[in-house]
Image (tube, helix red, strand yellow):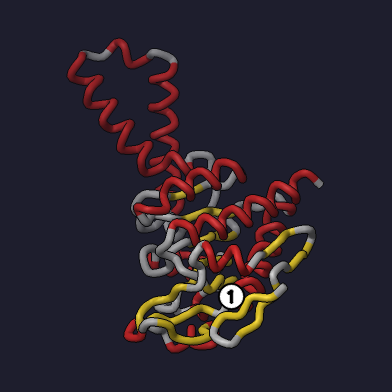
Amino acid sequence: MTTTIEGKKIKEKDKKDNLEINPEEMLKMGLHFGHRLSQIHPKMKDYVSGIKNGVYVIDLEKTAEKLKNAIEFIKKVVSEGKTLLLVGTKVQTKDITKKIAKECGFPYITERWLGGTLTNFKTIKKRIDYFKDLEGRKNKGELEKYTKKEKIKIEKELKDLEKKFEGIKDMSQIPDAIFVLDVKKDNLAVKEAKRKGIKIIAITDTNNDPSLIDYPIPANDDAVSSVTYILEKVKEAIIKEKSN
């Protein structure tokens, strides 16, 4: 069975290492919706199959191919015991980002990207160590000796540190690769990764520059359903990889 989008024929299933990439399901999840005509990056035109209702339609045949490439790279990173950092700070995708990261054992960032997270990790690590120390002292009941006012202040500081560093508190060094879910929103993460020579996987909507990304996945980065589909496929592949 095939699906046709703007004159393009797409195989219904593409099995590689038993991983199914189903274009019909991708259609249903809205991966093909790009941005309006005024918001196209010239280098994304190669990944567009047409225009519908004033919106660019992403070629899901190419999305499937690029998604497979990205997943193969992620599997390699995991199999070699290396670290992949998942970055998704957009409000609507924070929950799914955190969920998939925890299920796959990836460090993650879902709050505002802190400048220097990659380029000045030594300083960031000091803040992480401070957070872990404070958290440990609380768990041991060592904060009980402080006054009520002092404890309120410490609790407030802990919540702030947890918000910033919870997802990366076990990351002892900069990651070997990062997976960015919104290139525009987290452009600083992309810039820092480029400066440090860290491989970048990213969902690239039609308003993004795919040439900045080592493993671009052309797809809608706004719809929760689209991002969820991609992350679930990554999780599926990682679980199979770890079970082998």
In terms of image quadrants, where is residue 199?
A: bottom right
- The vertical placement of 224 against 144, above or below, is below
Q: Quadrant of the N terminus?
A: bottom right
Q: Is residue 200 visible?
A: no
**Residue at screen point 73% across, 54% down:** 80
**Residue at screen point 44% across, 31% down:** 132
In terms of image quadrants, where is residue 119?
A: bottom left
Foreground pick, 37 / 238: 37
In terms of image quadrants, where is residue 55?
A: bottom left
Foreground pick, 9 / 39: 9
Locate residue 150, reporting x and y percent: 21, 20
**Residue at screen point 71% across, 61% down:** 20
Locate residue 125, reporting x and y percent: 45, 44
Badge 1 amino acid: Leu
- The vertical placement of 93 against 204, above or below, is above
**Residue at screen point 26% across, 14% down:** 146
Foreground pick, 116 / 81: 81
- The vertical placement of 212 against 28, above or below, is below
> Is 101 positioned to the left or the right of 94 in the image?
right
